[in-house]
Amino acid sequence: MWVDKRRSWIELVILGGFALPHIWMRTLTVTAIATVVTVLYEEVPALHYSLTVAPFTLVGLPLGIFLGFRNNTAYDRFWEARKLWGALVNTSRSITRQALTLIQPQLEPGAKTPEQVQELQLRFVHLTIGYVHALRHHLRDTAPGDTLKELLPRESFESLRDESNVPLAILQRMGETVRLAYDQKWVHPFHVNVLEASLTALTDIQGACERIKSTPIPFSYTVLMHRIVAFYCVLLPFGLMDTVRWATPVVVLAISYCFFGLDAIGDEIEDPFGVDVNDLPLDSISRNIERNLRARIGEEMPEPVIPQKGILT
């Protein structure tokens, strides 16, 4: 995610933005076609054939509306994903607090908490941290092995190797930990429902994220937008030559940049869990959750993720 806001307005206009690397080839291709068509039109009288601007006006307005609708749909997916990861931050903090305060045996006043309970609490918090990192890898289709190996005991890590849905498997381990605490009478029956509600909230968050990832904008709609934009920009010189003459390539360059840019933005933010510049900074959010949770159990916190060249991953 782009987070550097220190640039001036002029710098943002001239240097800002990340659509150009994706669209420069198609923009230059359309401009080259416009240049060739303009030269032939001006130099070869037999080829003086031009359309009016009316067809492009009629098509351009609905095309802009449909591009805006598609980008709004893509942004809705992006914003919903951000709200889900915000909920993940809150739920992770809540379930950690619940594990540290509600999983407690009935002790005499002044008695120390047994070491087994403390170990169970630490294991539960580590599982929560592992779940957050595993969910990030799950949504990005990457392997969480190296991350989980540092967090979980060897036997827990080995048991997750063959799992197809690692975060779901970790939720199962967290539920089993709550059950173990209940069997040992380390948690009150009323408090089991509180912990279970937090586990259910994590499951709901994961399911919603998987829904966004596995249900992209309909492919036929995306293909249609690409085709209409391409045909519109390629044919645009034929509607401008009678009006702007030699300036046709410049006008086509400006208009094609607008349409191709809008088209590319929709493609980029459609999958908010990816690693494009404008996708969600899941690495940073996961690291912040880990820092918050480790602080609660008195462990050393890792360094936060630092933006690189204004980009936070």
Image: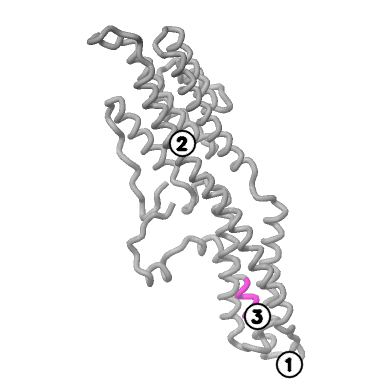
In terms of secondary structure, what is the magenta stretch mainly? Answer: helix
Name the residue type under label 3: Val
* Residue segment shown in magenta: 30-37
User: Which of pointers 1 and 2 lies earlier in the amino acid sequence?
Assistant: 1
Nearest the camera: 116 or 284?
116
| CA–CA distance in space, label 1 to label 3 | 14 Å
* Residue found at x 61% / y 70%: 29
The verdict on residue 107 being magenta is no
Crowd rating for badge 1 (residues with CA inside 10 Å; few <14, some 14–19, many 20+): few
| CA–CA distance in space, label 1 to label 2 | 67 Å
- Mark seen at residue 294: none
Rendered location of residue 106, percent (x, y): 34, 9
Residue picked out by circle 2: 88
Q: Is residue 35 above or below residue 127?
A: below
Residue picked out by circle 3: 36
Residue picked out by circle 1: 45
Pointers 1 and 3 in contact (CB under 8 A)? no
Nearest the camera: 80 or 182?
182
Crowd rating for badge 2 (residues with CA inside 10 Å; few <14, some 14–19, many 20+): many
Q: Is residue 276 left or right of residue 236?
A: left
Name the residue type under label 1: Pro
Crowd rating for badge 3 (residues with CA inside 10 Å; few <14, some 14–19, many 20+): few
